[in-house]
Image (tube, grey):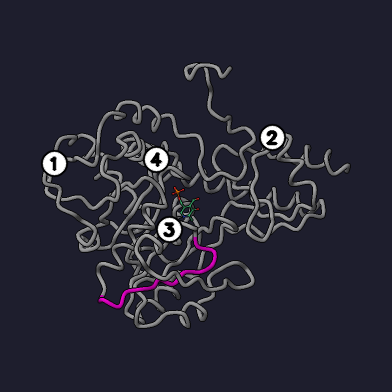
Amino acid sequence: MQPSVGERRPQSFERVLSSMCTEPHPAASRAAERFIASNPGDPGTYDAVADLETEAVAALGELAGLPEAHGYVTSGGTEANVQAVHAARNLGNAGNSNLVAPESAHFSFSKAAELLGMELRTVPTDGDHRADVDAVAAAVDDDTALVVGVAGSTEYGRVDPIPELAAVAEDAGTRFHVDAAWGGFYLPFTDHEWDFADAAVDTLTVDPHKVGRAVVPAGGLLARDAATLDALAVETPYLETPSQASLTGTRSGAGVASAAAALAELWPAGYRAEYERAADLAAWFAGELSERGYRAVDPELPLVAVDLPDPLFDELREVGWRITRTGAGEARVVVMPHVSRERLEVFLGTLDRLAGT
Ligand code: PLP
């Protein structure tokens, strides 16, 4: 018989290496608990959590280099991406029937295209897993509503050439969206010279419940202008406020409050320290794997993809390591805040034992 719900414990993070979720910051957990019954979807009634959402969006805007950002705390990266596509479709002309994204784009764009009755044109990435700008340009036509760039890809942690993709979108007169759901909290500390403000990005996904260390669910959709949210808004007759731009109605007050708390606590010094820690650790880990003769993809952001010969991958999973594969078959290790050097040393010890080295 199963133990009662009260006796059960969540999955420990100790061996979780492929997830983009992590342990929330203690301040985020405390804020989540206080606002667990508040509904940011009804800001007129739940004004305290609505204020926190305004603060969270402002902080995300600062992080992304857009001081006047519009947006809201979504249920996650999927909702933010769906709504970015949704706004692009609503804002353009009647021919807005396709979006163009690199093949590295998250599967949420397939959901968006299907829901919105649009064609998703995926184009190959270059030899280093980044969007191929010429291929994107070739796929864009008069019916393109949106060009998508990824800043921190789910499988390889790669950052697409954002200014070049923005230029393609601008030349074609289409909107440009950047999916930085995972990478957004690292980018301000890297040497990427673009930011939201000067690369002509219309919308951006950046998720507090990933590297931002908020509780689940807390994604983020940012928009350069108010017209984007207006294009998503529907009238809400029975609420105290006249309209709503979010996809879901009732939303998590816990997620919103925790996002505001984590950002207040960690932006910028805490996130910088985490970026530096994780980047060093990923470089060390990739080096350790290469020294052992495994082909590791050189990490750009803190994510290491590595070829592990059969049956090592399955054997590691069997002894409890939560790892997943890229589409091409490499194992992915995402160096999230809960992934420490000690845990990776234990992983390498297990790998050596299983490989008999
Ligand atoms: N975009 C990227 C780049 C992601 O890596 C993910 C998830 O890992 C998503 C979007 C979807 O986010 P969520 O699972 O919060 O909906």
Q: In the image, what residue type sits under mark 4?
A: Pro
Q: In the image, what residue type sits under mark 3?
A: Lys
Q: CA distance from mark 3 to mark 4?
A: 19 Å
- Mark 4 secondary-structure assignment: loop
Examine the rendered structure and indicate whether residue 64 appears above or below residue 39.
Answer: below
Question: In terms of sequence position, does the residue under pointer 2 or pointer 3 come before the other?
Answer: 3
Residue 169 % position (x, y):
38, 76
Question: In terms of sequence position, does the residue under pointer 3 or pointer 4 come before the other?
Answer: 3
Q: Residue at label 1?
A: 239
Is the shortest distance between ligand 1 and the CB of mark 2 under 8 Å? no
Is 319 contained in the magenta span? no
Determine whether, in the image, residue 145 is placed left or right of residue 39. Answer: right
Residue 25 % position (x, y):
44, 33
Q: Residue at label 3?
A: 111
Q: CA distance from mark 2 to mark 1?
A: 48 Å
Q: Please tell me the numbered disc located at residue 309.
A: none
Q: What span is in magenta?
A: 93-105
The residue sitting at 56% across, 68% down in the picture is 130
Is the shortest distance between ligand 1 and the CB of mark 4 under 8 Å? yes
Mark 3, mark 1: which one is toward the viewer?
3
Q: Residue at label 4?
A: 217
Q: In the image, what residue type sits under mark 1?
A: Leu
Examine the rendered structure and indicate whether residue 170 appears above or below residue 225.
Answer: below
Residue 53 % position (x, y):
26, 42
**Quadrant of the snapshot with the N terminus:** top right
- Mark 2 secondary-structure assignment: loop
The residue sitting at 36% across, 50% down in the picture is 220
Q: CA distance from mark 4 to mark 2?
A: 26 Å
